[in-house]
Amino acid sequence: MENIKTKSNSMLSAIDSYFKLSYYNTTVSTEITAGVTTFMTMAYILIVQPLFMSSAGMDVKAVTIVTAILSALFSIVMGLYTNRPFAMAPAMGGNAFFAYTLVAGGVVDWQTAMGMVFLSGVGFLLLTIFGLRGLIVEAIPKNLKFAIGVAVGFFIAMVGFKNGQIMVINSGTISMGSISNPHTILSLIGLFVTITLVLNKVKGGVLIGIIVTTLLGVPFGITQIPESFFSLPPSIEPIFFKLNIMDALKFSFLPLVFTFFVGDFFCTLGTLLGVSAQAGLLDENGNLPEVDKPFLVDSIATIVGALFGSTTITTFLESAAGVEEGGRTGLTAISTGVCFIFTIFLTPIVYVIPSAATAPALIFIGILMMTSIKFIDMEDMTEFVPAVITIMFTVFTDNMATGMSMGIISHVIIKILTKRYRELNLPVLILTLPLLGYFILL
């Protein structure tokens, strides 16, 4: 018995040492709870990704399993390599552009579009290897970095309002949802349950809120109990290694590859900075130490993902849910990855969690992330205005990449027009040119 206890203590000590749990003032149980919470808020990707890809003519069952495999694999790799609480999965936004604009829109077939995703991933990898992605992050003004964190908060909250049907957000229009809608009512109940638990400092409040709301959804007729909790995974052969890189290399497709590139670059950057700010991982200049590590994982994930038949794999905004539960290290991301492994065989259980149960968590977490606005310099209008533009364009266009790009462009223009161009750095000036091209190509 004593020998077992000694081995257990030795294992816990090794885990603490590798993930620096004591340094980040966290524990194994806290990290696991955080990882499960992150998983529950992002499990919807297992439903949404196949739905989107079916519009592109891809095999739905194969897409579901590939999504689970890649989310599991790269969340675990992210945790082990970077020791950061960032979970990974196919990017929202990039998948819509892939399925509806390119394939359903008749521009290319899905195999060629997948080749474009692969090429954009190669571009990410080269920029990361040469240290250019990290250089760009450091070159972005500090106030814009804080604004990005606020914008991410608004973006997450907006996703929550939309998923909970509390607001109807379509094509740039926003209206109030119907208070008589059971889905909306359940989301609002879940929101106040979550707020009550977290503000009363109940440990695991966000996770408990999701579980309670899911259970309340049964009498509402929203939470559906599956007939079976187990399913064997289907073959991924219909989409595995079916990408067409040669056709994607056509010069006329370069703008489309660039659109994938810019969208993923800034969505990843925004997520890293926003979630890291919430976790207190940024330094005094608003930078994330060793940022090239998560960028490297992100790049490789996109390349491997395209080979498997998935759109861009990126760091997920919902990682903020785990951070709010106390997750601070890679053990959180690994826990999320392990949950995704189980879904390969237990997919029906994932479908039990309704969006009305995860929406409240996203709304409340988004609100908490907006507190970063207090760090923005509001006295210097040449700093404050670009920061506000970043936030407003993110919210009003429902696009994080657009908001960040407009913020950087406006920062450069305002500094030049106010004759304070000496405050600009060369990397930001260089970055502005392709961003202008990005808007021209939209």
Image: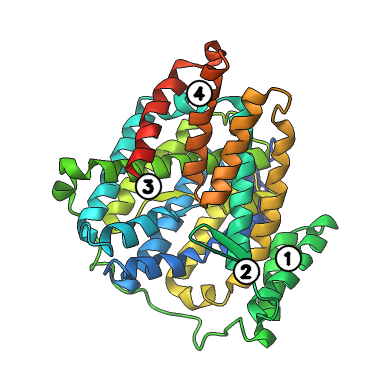
Residue that label 3 marks = 301
Side of 257 where 199 appears, left or right = right
| Label 3 environment density (alpha carbons within 10 Å; few <14, some 14–19, many ≥20) | many
Residue 395: percent from the left, percent from the top?
A: 58, 49
Residue that label 1 marks = 191
In the rendered structure, which amino acid carries the disc numbered 1?
Answer: Leu
In the rendered structure, which amino acid carries the disc numbered 3?
Answer: Ala
Looking at the rendered structure, which numbered label has been put on residue 412?
A: 4
- Secondary structure under tag 3 reads helix
Give the residue drawn at x 36%, y 45%: 442
The answer to whether 411 is drawn above or below residue 316 in the figure is above
Q: Which is nearer the eye, 136 or 316?
A: 136
Q: Which is nearer the eye, 69 or 415?
A: 415
Q: Which is nearer the eye, 193 or 158?
A: 158
Q: Are marks 1 and 2 in contact (CB under 8 Å)?
A: yes
Residue 7: percent from the left, percent from the top?
A: 63, 50
